[in-house]
Amino acid sequence: MSKTFIDPWPTVLEEAVRCNKQIIILCQNRNWKDGIDDICSCIKYHTKLDLKTYHDNNNSSMLNFDLDKYYRYLFDNNFEFYIDRDRFKTFDEFLTGWE
């Protein structure tokens, strides 16, 4: 997590999750949330180097989210998407509840 740079969607972190790599996130006190916080909300990760603990993210909502269905929806709707913020309070809720 950066104290100075907002990353709307950290693709390298997403790729690490998709490859089920061990991830270390050094938490920072920040006054914003970005894509790193979104991803952290639905995975298991380390906050320090810990060679004895293994986090398996194969069942993460990120990996179970149907990207094909989502992109087809965007294509069919002129790339417009409204997120119902009353229904989805977290990124994980969106990934598990959007249809």
Image (cartoon, rainbow, N blue to C red):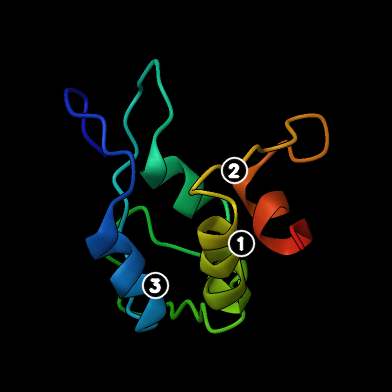
- Pointer 3 or 1: first along the chain: 3
Q: Are marks 2 and 3 in contact (CB under 8 Å)?
A: no
- Pointer 1 or 2: first along the chain: 1
Q: Residue at position x 43%, y 77% from top?
A: 53
The picture places residue 6, in percent across and down from the top left corner, at 26, 30
Query: Secondary structure beneath disc 2?
Result: loop
Q: Do the residues labelled 1 and 2 touch (CB within 8 Å)?
A: yes
Residue 55 got which mark?
Answer: none
Q: Residue at position x 51%, y 61% from top?
A: 75
**What's the amino acid at mark 1?**
Tyr
Circle 1 residue: 73
The picture places residue 24, in percent across and down from the top left corner, at 30, 60
| Disc 3 packing (10 Å; few <14; some 14–19; many ≥20) | many
The picture places residue 71, in percent across and down from the top left corner, at 51, 66
Query: Secondary structure beneath disc 1?
Result: helix
| Disc 1 packing (10 Å; few <14; some 14–19; many ≥20) | some
Q: Quadrant of residue 8?
A: top left
Circle 3 residue: 17
**What's the amino acid at mark 3?**
Val
